Image (tube, grey):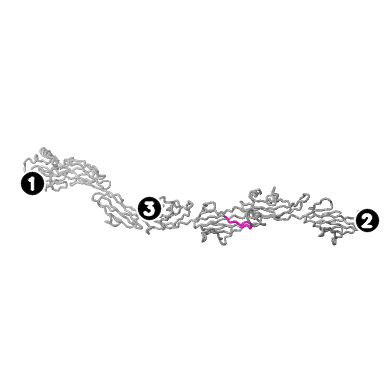
């Protein structure tokens, strides 16, 4: 009789051939013999046995088992077959069946230290932890064999962990790094359990369900980069109160997504409770991967992937205040100014500790705001030194401060303020503002320009015009738009010319004399008597005079008007003495008549001495000035004259005409010159 397994490969056949061994999840079919000659027909009855309470073996028939085969044997026992060929009835020897149990078990995560739950599901593990995986058969049979395996994601297959053949396995970071790629977020572990038969053969393999270890990453929070956000630490940012920032939690890694695992989020912040302890609380509704913040607090996020639940480290947000202010003209004065005016612009907040100020002016040409280098106070005095080109200027104030991180941040720029400077009025003058004035003349000076009203010399003359009749400085003040004033000085200087017609001359009757004057650019000549002129408009002229028959001599005053380039005039004259040809004795009289004396009190030639002409006779003298007016008369002339007029006052230097009569007849008519200053 033979035992033939059907369809099972894990049956261990052992000697003698009347026994079989296999695992409990298999079954065999026993087959009875047939007549080798083929002439007999067998009837079959399958039997088994059991042990009584007294230890006896009792064989009994298996109900219904009358076929040649006995199928579905899956438990240990001894089996027999009774064969009846119609002549003989025979029972076979026992066929021993040995069924081994499959080493079914589970694995779990066992805490290393202290009491704790045994975890059969997925395990969350921090990078610094170690986890003990253990087969959950605390008293396993003696012949169980173990082989731990890990799923290799890069190969896509389970691999044996070399030397890991115990019922426990320690998983830590060092073991994790053996994975390729290193440190995966998910690692699957299982154990293959076998039984070892009495013949030292491995059988009845069992593979446990895998256990998933989720390696908890080191979560770090980031932020959306913006120009106005300053990073002040690995996990802290700083910005101004008018701004906001986006804190960003890590996204679900693709490795988790590929395994159907996704992050969920809950944002938190903290506060201090009544006992002074810092407590975390949820931000209601904030369950996205990002959080928009505008308040200085500490923020956290709880990340839950269904395996691991972890709260991030604090992310610090520091919010600085804006140094809000505005500017005014202080005191409140008109911002329409004249060039000589100024205005103080001031921050309303005056001085606040820690705030820094910088005044700026808009440069129209460069189309940009420029710092006023020295104006770094809460106030600034604005005058015309601040605008080199434009009359209207715009000013503003930039306020900032240095925060706790040493950053210049949260600068605030005020609205600008407009300051308008009106220029002083300009002047024009007709005929000009620098004038020459001829003696005795007057000039009408008319001011023009952009003034609306005028006053001269402190208000002594009102209006745009003034008559000027003497040299000097004339100050005019003009008032223009916005009441702005300006002054200008008109300089009036004297023009003068000094005419000189030349010395007195003596000519004969009808003789032509040449006269030449100086002191001008143009000249006019005329005389007290009609003369014969060659050209009375030239600088040099020729003149002659014919004495009337009644006169032996005559004195004619010739005048010259000198006109300079500015049109000023001066008049000079000379005496032309015309003499008729005289007999010799008359020449003696003329030669004894001095024509010059110097009455200056120096004791030399102080008197005009005509005693050689009067010769002791009773004489009368009349002395005339150049215009023919008598200045001195003496009916009893003794021959001496001191150069005084009729009242005894010294006559001015010059040439004088005289008539000397003696014994009732004119003895001589001639001219004499007084010269006191003989230098």
Q: Nearer the viewer, residue 151 or 34?
A: 34
Above or below: residue 388 compared with residue 279:
above
Q: Secondary structure at mark 1?
A: strand
Q: Are marks 2 and 1 in contact (CB under 8 Å)?
A: no
Sequence-first tag of 2 and 1: 2
Disc 1 marks which residue?
635
Indicate which disc residue 39 carries: 2
The residue lying at 76 percent from left, 53 percent from top is 204
Residue 390 locus on image (x, y percent): 40, 53
- SS of the residue at dot 2? loop
Q: Earlier along the polypeptide chain: callout 1 or callout 3?
A: 3
- Residue most extreme to the front: 54
**662 vs 584, nearest the viewer:** 662
For marks 1 and 3, give the CA distance. Answer: 84 Å
Left or right of residue 538, residue 158 in this image: right
Q: Which residue is mark 3?
A: 384
Query: Quick check: marks 3 and 2 in contact, CB under 8 Å?
Result: no
Residue 582 is situated, as x and y percent measured from the top left of the image, at: 12, 39
Q: CA distance from mark 2 to mark 1?
A: 226 Å
Is tag 3's residue or tag 2's residue first in the polypeptide sequence?
A: 2
Residue 580 in the image: state x and y as whole percent.
14, 41
């Amino acid at each position: 009789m033979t035992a033939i397994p059907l369809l099972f490969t894990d049956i261990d056949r052992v000697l003698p051939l009347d026994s079989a061994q296999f695992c409990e999840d298999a079954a065999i079919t026993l087959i009875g013999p047939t007549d080798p000659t083929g002439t007999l027909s067998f009837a079959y009855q399958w039997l088994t046995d059991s042990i009584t309470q007294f230890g006896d073996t009792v064989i009994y028939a298996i109900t219904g088992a009358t076929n040649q085969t006995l199928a579905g044997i899956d438990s240990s026992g001894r089996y027999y077959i009774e064969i009846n060929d119609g002549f003989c009835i025979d029972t076979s020897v026992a066929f021993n069946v040995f069924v081994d149990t499959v080493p079914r078990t589970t694995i779990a995560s066992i805490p290393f230290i202290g009491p704790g739950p045994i975890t059969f599901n997925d395990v969350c593990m921090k990078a610094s932890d170690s986890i003990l995986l253990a087969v959950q058969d605390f008293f396993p049979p003696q012949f169980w064999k173990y082989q731990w395996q890990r799923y290799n994601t890069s190969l896509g297959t389970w691999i044996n962990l070399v030397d890991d053949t115990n019922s426990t396995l320690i998983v830590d970071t060092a073991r994790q790094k053996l994975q390729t790629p290193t440190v995966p977020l998910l690692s699957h572990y299982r154990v293959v359990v076998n039984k070892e038969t009495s013949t030292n053969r491995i059988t009845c393999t069992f593979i446990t369900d895998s256990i998933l270890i989720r390696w908890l990453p080191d979560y770090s929070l980031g932020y959306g980069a913006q120009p106005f956000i300053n990073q002040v630490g690995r996990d802290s940012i700083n910005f101004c109160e008018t701004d906001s920032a986006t804190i960003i939690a890590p996204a679900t890694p693709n490795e988790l997504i590929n395994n159907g695992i996704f992050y969920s989020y809950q944002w938190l912040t903290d506060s201090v409770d009544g006992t002074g302890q810092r407590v975390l609380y949820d931000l209601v509704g904030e369950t996205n991967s990002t959080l928009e913040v505008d308040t200085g607090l500490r923020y956290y996020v709880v990340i839950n992937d269904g395996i691991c639940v972890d709260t991030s480290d604090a992310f610090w947000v520091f919010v600085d205040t804006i140094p809000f202010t505005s500017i005014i003209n202080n005191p409140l004065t008109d911002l329409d100014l004249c060039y000589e005016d100024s205005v103080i612009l001031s921050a309303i907040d005056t001085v606040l500790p820690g705030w820094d100020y910088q005044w700026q002016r808009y440069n129209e040409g460069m189309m940009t705001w420029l710092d006023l280098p020295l104006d770094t106070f809460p106030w600034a005095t604005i005058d015309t030194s601040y605008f080199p080109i434009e009359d209207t200027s715009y000013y503003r104030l930039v306020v900032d401060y240095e925060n706790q991180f040493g950053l210049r941040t949260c600068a605030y720029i005020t609205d600008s303020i407009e300051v308008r400077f009106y220029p002083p009025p300009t002047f024009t003058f007709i005929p000009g503002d620098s004038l020459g004035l001829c003696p005795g003349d007057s000039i009408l000076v008319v001011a023009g320009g952009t003034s609306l009203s005028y006053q001269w010399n402190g208000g002594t003359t009102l209006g745009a015009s003034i008559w000027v009749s003497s040299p000097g400085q004339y100050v005019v003040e003009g008032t223009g738009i916005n009441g702005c004033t300006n002054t200008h000085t008109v300089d009036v200087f004297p023009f003068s010319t000094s005419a000189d017609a030349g010395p007195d001359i003596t000519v004969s009757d009808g003789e032509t004399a040449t006269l030449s004057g100086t002191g001008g650019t143009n000249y006019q000549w005329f005389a007290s008597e009609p003369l014969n002129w060659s050209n009375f408009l030239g600088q040099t002229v020729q003149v002659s005079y014919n004495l009337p028959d009644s006169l032996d001599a005559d004195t004619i005053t010739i005048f010259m008007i000198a006109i300079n380039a500015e049109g000023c005039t001066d008049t000079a004259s000379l005496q032309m003495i015309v003499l008729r040809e005289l007999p010799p004795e008359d020449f003696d009289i003329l030669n004894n008549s001095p024509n010059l004396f110097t009455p200056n009190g120096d004791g030399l030639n102080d008197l005009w001495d005509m005693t050689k002409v009067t010769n002791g006779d009773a004489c009368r003298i009349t002395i005339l000035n150049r215009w023919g007016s008598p200045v001195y008369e003496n009916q009893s002339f003794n021959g001496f004259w001191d150069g005084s007029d009729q009242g005894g006052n010294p006559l001015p230097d010059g040439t004088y005409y005289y008539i000397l009569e003696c014994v009732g007849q004119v003895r001589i008519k001639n001219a004499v010159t007084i010269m006191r200053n003989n230098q």
